[in-house]
Every structure is written in C-alpha cells, then in structure tokens.
Amino acid sequence: MTQSKSKLQTQPIEDFIARVRTAKNKQEKTVILTMQDADRLASSLNQTMTRIVSVQEEIIEVLKSAQQSQTINVEMDGGNFSK
C-alpha cells in the first residue's frame, strides 16, 4: 500500500483559487481558464484526491491495528473448588 510520496503539485489549485477570489472581488460573473490551465488544474486535483484516498486507507489500517492491539482476552477457569 505504500506508494511513492512525491510532493503534491498544488500550485494550479492555488492559482485557480486566487483567480476565483480576484473575480469575486471584482464582482465578475465568470472565470475563464485556458485548456492548458484547466488540464493542469484537473491533474493537480486528481493527484491530490488520489493522495487523500491513500492517506485515508493508511489511517483506517492504523486505527484497526491499534484497536486490535488494545483488545485483551482474559480466560479464567474455575480451578479446583473441592475441599
């Protein structure tokens, strides 16, 4: 499950957020992206979402392992009660 942890390329996402913020401040009704910018944004979002799912799966496995390690099984027998 361990995969290469290359640095996420979030710059296209940050650029898009900045463009939306600027358009909102100028009360513009649209934000237009070139196909190149849209492709970079889609690639960055895909990479980010894939990493999030991977991290989520790792967290679930760690929680399962931690839960199993906290389980204590106690077995008792009655011993010998005859006198």
Image (cartoon, helix red, strand yellow):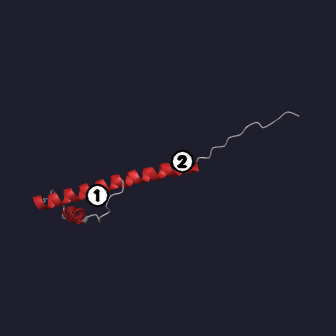
Q: Amino acid at mark 2?
A: Gln
| Left or right: 12, with 77 as reference point | left
User: Which residue is tagged 1?
Assistant: 48
Report the quarter where the C terminus lies: top right
SS assignment at label 2: helix
Q: Quadrant of residue 9?
A: bottom left
Q: Which mark identifies residue 68?
A: 2
| Left or right: 36, with 25 as reference point | left
For image coordinates 73% across by 37% down, the residue present is: 77
Where is residue 62? Give x, y as percent: 46, 53
Please tell me how many numbered marks the rendered image carries. Answer: 2
Residue furthest out toward the top? 82
Mark 2 touches mark 1? (CB < 8 Å): no
Spatial separation of the CA atoms under disc 2 and disc 1: 30 Å
Look at the image and tell me whether residue 34 can be seen: no
Where is residue 63? Give x, y as percent: 48, 51
For image coordinates 20% across by 56% down, the residue present is: 42
Report crowding for label 2: few under 14, some 14 to 19, many 20 or more residues within 10 A (C-alpha).
few
SS assignment at label 1: helix
Where is residue 17? Give x, y as percent: 24, 62
Where is residue 4? Give x, y as percent: 31, 61
Name above or below for residue 23 compared with residue 78: below
| Residue 46 vs residue 73, the one in the foreground | 73
| Left or right: 63, with 16 as reference point | right
Of the two numbered discs 2 and 1 in the rendering, the one whose residue sits closer to the viewer: 2
For image coordinates 48% across by 48% down, the residue present is: 64
